[in-house]
Amino acid sequence: MNVAHWPQLYRTIWISDVHLGTRGCKADYLLEFLKFTESETLFLVGDIVDGWRLKRSWYWHQSHNDVIQKLLRKARKGTKVVYVPGNHDEALRDYVDMQFGGVTLKAHDIHQLADGRRLLVMHGDQFDGIVRYAKWLAFLGDTAYNMALTANTWLNHVRNRLGMPYWSLSAYLKHKVKNAVEYISNYEIAVSEEARRAGADGVVCGHIHHAEIRDIDGILYCNDGDWVESCTALVEHFDGRLEILRWTEIRGGLVENPMPLLAASGALRPRSKAPAKRDREPVPAGGKDGDHRETVDAGHSRVPRLFGLF
């Protein structure tokens, strides 16, 4: 992809599995992506905030707060933002069909592409037997997964110091384990069958942290990936064409050719003598550095407890 074409405008963007509130979240990468892209509609397809992790131990870096502010700012500036909660932010399912800060919460949604195809949008955890029937095992697996993500963070810190590109250890291990590969396949088939039952032409989901677009028995299966391993998003172009964007690959070209990066960051804009307006509303800080537990002021709306009600 030609980096000279960035920033880019899309008809629709889908992101999921950001897991704000965990150390494995690639919030800095997501902020870059949100600065370099605009869309008419933005779907947040679940697990944006990791309520499971926050209930066990509080971690909230300033970059996580910046992501929340950026999403709310997009909603205020006219982007239609739809939040479909997942299992890690399941507390929000009690508030579907309500709005917070211009963001609409829905249990699921139907999105019509520019070419007329209809896509069912849902997180997909209801088709994960472990999450649905053995939640204690899901919590155990979540702990092991976060350990892998921690190792992944340190590994990539070393790789970055050595001038090597980002590489996901956890994703590599997951796709090398036979049972994990079989689980992904079964999940994709189950989700596609749900889209068929709903009378849709396809489905957009998240949950399994594996970005993909493929046909499953006449149903278009799309998974937008995650922002803890692969840093991917699903986008719709204005002709209805769908594409998976892999930000770690795209940003490599932007770093090598920094003009679009500088333009998006504002570094190339002429300096004004007037004091710059604060780009982010003030957020009361907690007792520790980066520990923001209070209400985020989002213009005319008050978003309760960091948008995730945790």
Image: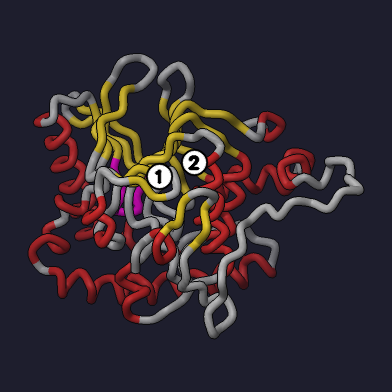
Q: Is residue 172 visible?
A: no
Task: Tell me if residue 176 comes above or below residue 70 in the rendering.
Answer: below
Query: Is residue 140 shown in magenta?
Result: no
Asked which secondary structure carries label 1, the reply is strand
In 3D space, how far apart are the residues under numbered discs 2 and 1 (Cα atoms)?
A: 6 Å
Q: Position of residue 158 (x, y in %)?
A: 62, 72
Residue 133 falls left or right of residue 249: left
Residue 240 in which image quadrant = top left
Task: Tell me if residue 14 comes above or below residue 237 in the rendering.
Answer: below
Q: Which mark is residue 182?
A: none
Which residue is drawn at the image coordinates 62% and 40% (left, top)?
36
Which residue is drawn at the image coordinates 26% and 62% (left, top)?
91
Which residue is drawn at the image coordinates 45% and 42% (left, top)?
233
Asked which secondary structure carries label 2, the reply is helix
Q: Position of residue 295 (x, y in %)?
A: 46, 65
Boundaries of the magenta span: 205-211
Mark 1 Cα within 10 Å, few/some/many (few <14, many 20+)? many
- The residue identified by callout 2 is 75
**Kind of residue sitting beneath label 1:** Val
Q: Quadrant of the C terminus?
A: bottom left
Q: Are marks 2 and 1 in contact (CB under 8 Å)?
A: yes
Q: Quadrant of the N terminus?
A: top right
**Kind of residue sitting beneath label 2:** Ala
- The residue identified by callout 1 is 103
